[in-house]
Image (cartoon, rainbow, N blue to C red):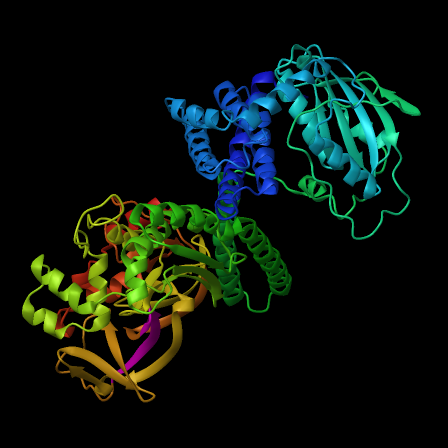
Amino acid sequence: MTNPPDERGAELRELFFETSQELLQALNEESLKLEKNPGDEEIVRSIRRTVHTLKGDSAACGLRELSELAHLFEDALTLESAAAHAALAEISFSAADVFAEMLAAYHGGGPMPATESLRQRINELTAAPAAKKTRRRKKSVEPARSTGRSTGKDWTDAEKRALAQAQAAGLGLYDIIVKIDPHCTMPIAARQLIQNAISGIGQVIVVRPDAKSPAASKQVQFVFATTQSQEQIAAKCHIPTIAGDIVVTLIEAPAAKPPKNVPPVATPEHEASAGLPAPSQISASAAAPPAPVEERAPEPGLSQALVENILRVEAGRIDNVLNLVGELIIGKSMLQQALGEFGKRYPKELLRGKFADAMAFQARVLNDLQRSVMKIRMVPVDQLFRRFPRIVRDVARQCGREVDLELAGQETDLDKGILDAIAEPLTHLVRNAVSHGIEPAEERRRLGKSPRGKIKLNAYHQGNQVVVEISDDGRGIDAQKIRTKALELGMMTGEEASRLSEGETLDFIFRPGFSTAEEVTEVSGRGVGMDVVQSVLQRLKATIHVETHVGQGTTFRLKLPLTLAIIKALMFWVEQRLYAIPLNAVSQIARAMESEVHQVDNYEVLQLRNQVLPLLRLGRPAAPDVDRKSTKLFVLVITVGERKYGLIVDSLEGEEELVIKALDDQTFSTDLVNGASILGDGKVVLILNLLAVVEHVARLRPEAAGLVKCGLLLNHTDRARLALSAGGHA
């Protein structure tokens, strides 16, 4: 059963909005290369191919304004004078920006951006005499394009080169004519769908007629390079309700064994026509599709064949599957709890073993399912890193800096939701590194540095976390300057400033309204941004650490969780309440006596294996009349940022895989809790935000600390409401 025409059109548009972002990214990257290598004709051809693809895809979706503007830019790029034009890279950057704004307007239903300025700049490329000569030559071959089948005389030089490369590579060349079904409501989109279908088994070198031609709605003609047979090509072209009669003509048979070390075929960037007399033909009808033929594996050189193995899925659908996996994990805990009670009640029952085996099997399958879904959500950070060369280039030009960007660890995988969430914080840190960190070229020369500054983005796995580093070799951060500025802004007193360590001083850059910039610019100086970075990272249960050396540079180190949905947790009891923290934050569990706890400057510390450990007491301290020598403590040694703390708890419950349920502010309003989870017996466990707990508890005197002051103690009614909101039982 086929989808209605409007449904197919909507699906096609959604697919285009996804792929167009990759095209715009490619256009930005090619423009950056052209800026470094002006006049490089190969790069110009690559830009032309990208713009041509964008033009064709947008035309297939009926996005007329975008298609016409891309067509105008593509035509200008075909001129001989275009590659030599000094401002071509700038025009290409402007085109990428306007295309992005137009796509955003189409997708969001907003107003279209102004394009007059870009059109004028594109017209600059056609002003040179060489360009006019090229345009006359191009016009002379135009009539041949309007005819049905050409003889190859109207092929462009790029198309002829691509055909020659295909022949040298031993690929077969075919002329394909596909009649568009007269009942098809979107003939232009149909052309694109047919082209996408056959691109999976070869390379489309020539397309006729032009999408704007009146004949475009009736048929489409390709010159196609592949190792597949005519039957297989015809089978690929056959798309019900879209393709009518199909004629596949062999132009040149594929070689038995393609020569080695032959460069891959370069698909031309221009639409052109094709058609040569051929020794054999094969026809197919929409009413009688050809019998399916087993396809041979495509040649390794044909990278487009990999497209068939890629499935684009909306992230929300994967989130739904992950949420269902989380519910299954809760169900597994409930079954395990029931099995434990069954074993206690009927210790000699033979069915216990069968139940246990079934539970073990279910647990293995569920663990594999969870890992598989999590891997689907994992994407390489390169998807985010790729946008920063353009950002660094633009900010450097605004600030008058010379900056090189180095990328490393692009293959590191991270949860798609986290990757999207850190895009804005990471962008702000990179912009700050250029505007605040890197010095002007003259100043760097006086300091004996290279006039070009360097910024490095790096990502790598560290245990169950992903670390993202933003480093620069600039002026560094002066802690004394921060203290002075904080005093000027009234953020602390002179006495407090004298007691601050360097790390505590650097934390002021994350305070709202704090900025050391001497003047406000478009890039920096408003005191807004770094506090947003901190708040976003706290929401993600991530941390940020600053490492700086005056005159040498600064490194911001972000530590991010691999996922936000399911965590391995250590559960413990404090004052008869159950809490949990991420297991990867716990480095060790120690036992100590109350008498071993000492006070230093009104803070509790514990000497553990030759190191002094600051303590965080979540519960109330022991009463004065209690024998301190006989009172035992559980101490969880946790790592928060770059520092270690001891978390004092009453007793341990054990390890468990928890599904995090987000809490809304109406249910529970505190930043000390990241979320809640439900155990198999219906108990609700709160998952603590360790960074917020450290910040709150460490500032309090020991006698004032504890969960009462932190707002974590709940009465029975609170916990019942919390359980119901999280979907469990009180």
Residue drawn where x is 46% and y is 51% of the image: 385
Q: Residue at x 89, y 42 (%)?
A: 255
Residue 101 in the image: state x and y as whole percent.
Answer: 41, 30
The residue under the point 23% across, 63% down is: 507
Corner quadrant of residue 577: bottom left
Front in this rendered view, residue 126 or 668 = 126
How far from the left and from the top, in percent, is residue 281? 90, 23
Tell me: 465 left or right of 719.
right
When the figure is inspected, residue 583 is found, relative to residue 320, above or below; the finding is below
Quarter placement of the N terminus: top right
Q: Nearer the viewer, residue 385 or 27?
A: 27
Residue range of the region highlighted in magenta in the rendering: 631-643
Q: Name the main secondary structure of what is drawn in magenta.
A: strand
- The answer to whether residue 140 is seen in the rendering is yes
Residue 341: give x, y in percent of width and height: 49, 62
Q: Is residue 102 left or right of residue 45?
A: left
Q: Is residue 438 visible?
A: no
Q: Is residue 273 left or right of residue 408?
A: right
Query: Farthest residue toward the front?
Result: 129
In the image, is residue 146 above or below residue 539? above
Left or right: 281 in relation to 62 = right
In the figure, 48 relative to 441: above or below?
above
Identify the residue at horizontal 33%, vertical 62% (top origin): 544
